[in-house]
Amino acid sequence: MASRQLLTDEERRLLLGVPRDPDALARHYTLTRFDQELVVGRRGAANRLGFAVQLALLRHPGTGLVQMGEPVNALVTWLAARLDIPAATFTEYASRPQTMTDHARILAAALGLRPPSAADLPFMIEAAAQSAWSTDRGQPIAAGVVAALRAEKIILPAPAVIERAAIAGRARARKRATDALLAGVSAVQVAKLDRLLTVDPAIGATPLAWLRNAPTSRRRRTISVYCSTGCALSATSTSRLEPQRGYTMTAFSSSSEKVAYRTRIRSAAMPRTGDARFWWQL
């Protein structure tokens, strides 16, 4: 089964990836004096460059080199130029997993960070739920999870973990919103609302869908719907009323014209015998 994705590739790159333009690289990855002291303390050009890359990634987006889901070539090239180290030496560094792990541990301690764990998942889901309370879009929800992890000085997990937590948080927010909306609604009223979601075979749609599309519907038929109190109503398609509606833009020269106009409208919208009446107020 394909994994569920909350973000598009571009949204994921902007939130959890390495920027590509020079201005963004300078903004996120310019080494401070403290950073330079940490880097200079490594022996060998490959170690200094690799150490600087890991340090930069922990600054932004806030994850380790191992957890990065995309190449970091732009960052390597940019840092290599500033450290006056050939960018090709990074290949040598990346081929030594134990060195990378040791450096990641040293950097986490120096920056006051800790790696993520399974115990952080409920925290991530709740952060996503808080962000999803005001939006249903994936990018702001995932950004809320990332911001919460950064605030707690937790190294970001893999992007897939962040997305799964964001999806779970959005579902939690939707459930809370539903509970809040239905808190004062009785069981009888809920049943009536459910009837609005039941497909009517006569029209091939739910009453709610028909009501939503009624102003633009072109069908010439009379159908039964249910109002919020559960009473049966009926109405004709607006296609029969549109020619008459055009007269509302002009003034009537006499009261008799106004009465004749209303009579024409009500005749066009008259329900079937035995149905309750339902037409627009004129």
Image (cartoon, grey):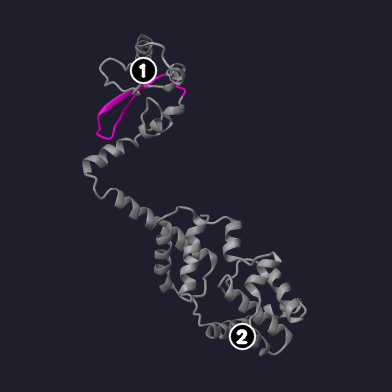
Q: Is residue 48 left or right of residue 106?
A: right
Q: Examine the image and state in which quarter residue 69 appears.
A: bottom right
Tell me the element at label 2.
helix
Q: Tell me if mark 2 has few (under 14), some (14-19) or many (20+) residues whose alpha carbon lies within 10 angstroms of its own.
A: few
Q: Residue visible at 72% across and 80% down?
A: 92
Give how far across and how far down residue 32 sits, in percent.
Answer: 63, 81
Q: Residue visible at 36% across and 31% down?
A: 207
Q: Which mark is residue 47?
A: none
Tell me where the magenta segment starts and ends, as one range: 218-235
Q: Tell me if mark 1 has few (under 14), some (14-19) or many (20+) residues whose alpha carbon lies within 10 angstroms of its own.
A: many
Residue that badge 2 annotates: 34
The kind of residue tagged 1 is Ala
Give how far across and how far down residue 30 sits, in percent.
Answer: 66, 76
Q: Examine the image and state in which quarter residue 239 appears.
A: top left
Residue that badge 1 annotates: 269
On whether residue 231 falls in the magenta region, the answer is yes
Tell me the element at label 1.
helix
Quadrant in which the C terminus appears: top left
Q: Is residue 40 visible?
A: yes
User: Mark 2 or mark 1, which has the lower sequence index?
Assistant: 2
Return the residue found at the far front.
253
The kind of residue tagged 2 is Phe
On whether residue 3 falls in the magenta region, the answer is no
Please tell me which residue lies in front, 236 or 207. Answer: 236
Image vertical order of residue 189 relative to residue 175, above or below: above
Image vertical order of residue 89 relative to residue 263, above or below: below
Give how far across and how far down residue 146 sits, in percent.
Answer: 50, 67
